[in-house]
Image (spheres, grey):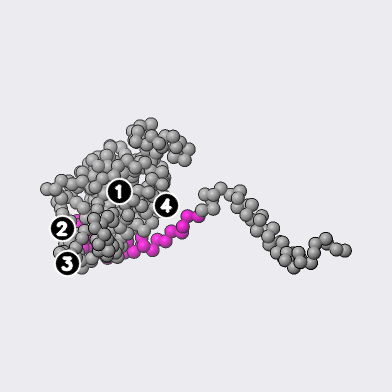
Amino acid sequence: MSSGFPKSFWRTYTPRNIRNELLLRLRSLARSQVPPERLRRAPVYDDSHAVSVGRFYDSHHDQFMRVYGGVIQAFRTKNVSDLLNRQIRSIGFRPGQRALDAGCGVAVPAIHFAGNVDIRVDCITISSTQYEVATRNVVAANLTERVRVVQGDYHRLGDYFEKCAYDVVYLLESFGHSRAKARVLAACWEMLKPGGLLYIKDLFRRVPLRPEHARRIDREIRKINQAYRYEVGDLNAVLDALRGRGFILDSLQAAQLELEEFEDLAISNEFQELTGIARITDWGDYIFPVDFFEIKGIKPRFDPQERLDRHFLQTLLHPGVS
């Protein structure tokens, strides 16, 4: 019995081709029923760079302590207590708050904040040596009830700390060690209460004033990244990631210090001379490749996905406003 189809049809559309086409269309239909966010898988996180950061600080711990002391920040005052007191004011700590120090070093800033403002601070460092020293520093300061230190990767804050529990998450020249900055911002978002504050003080790639400076800035950035296990951030890219995650950009400013208080980065040069790391040999041809900025972001009290009308009024919605 004839099938009613010419022989050319069956030569073109074999039973196998028809079956595969049906399966393809069924799969496409099934995918169309899945919400788009479930189809977009987050990239697999590679922690190898974070591990190398920990090893770097383990290897150079003694040199850091000799040059920087307990406050490992390059942009600093001559008296580091002035720097930490300024950060208390800039962050806006209030008694009774709960804070998280992401990249705490040996916990000297956390100890200063907890002791002077009566807050509780949870801290994390990727370095095993820093963890041991930080733990001893907390005990010596008699602040074990208010400062807690863990060793771990700040890209995975939710593995170590309670989510939606913190009034403030801060990063003091530790953010730049990340090669997955959007992931760090997402981890900080998870830790913060609605209305909580994210504070970042770090160095960012300088925009060249002349086109011919761009290549030299790129060269110095590569040296910093390689020497310090860093990834100097692009300010605009970081701000886009911060706002894209849902944070309200509360403020952005160049890191502020009085000129007579400014340490002038001489301490960083001393570290380079001591270790040979990223040593600058020709100051006459040197172009400073970074700027230091302070960024404040607020986690809204409302769900940005559901209340876009309120998000439009973001300048009115500071943490103290319900």
Q: Look at the image and say whether residue 42 sits in the magenta stretch.
A: yes
Residue tagged 4: 159
Residue range corresponding to the magenta coloring: 41-70
Q: Look at the image and say whether residue 73 sits in the magenta stretch.
A: no
In percent of width and height, residue 296 lies at: 31, 44
Residue, far left = 260
CA gap, disc 1 and disc 2: 23 Å
Please name which of the two marks, 1 or 4, marks the residue nearer to the observer: 1
In percent of width and height, residue 82 lies at: 17, 46
Q: Mark 4: which amino acid?
A: Asp
| Quadrant position of residue 308 | top left
Q: Nearer the viewer, residue 274 or 219?
A: 219
Residue tagged 1: 200
Classify mark 1: helix, strand or loop. strand
Residue, far right = 1
Q: Which mark, by number, is residue 282?
A: 3
Where 10 falls versus 183 (above or below)? below
For marks 2 and 3, the one nearer the N-term is 2
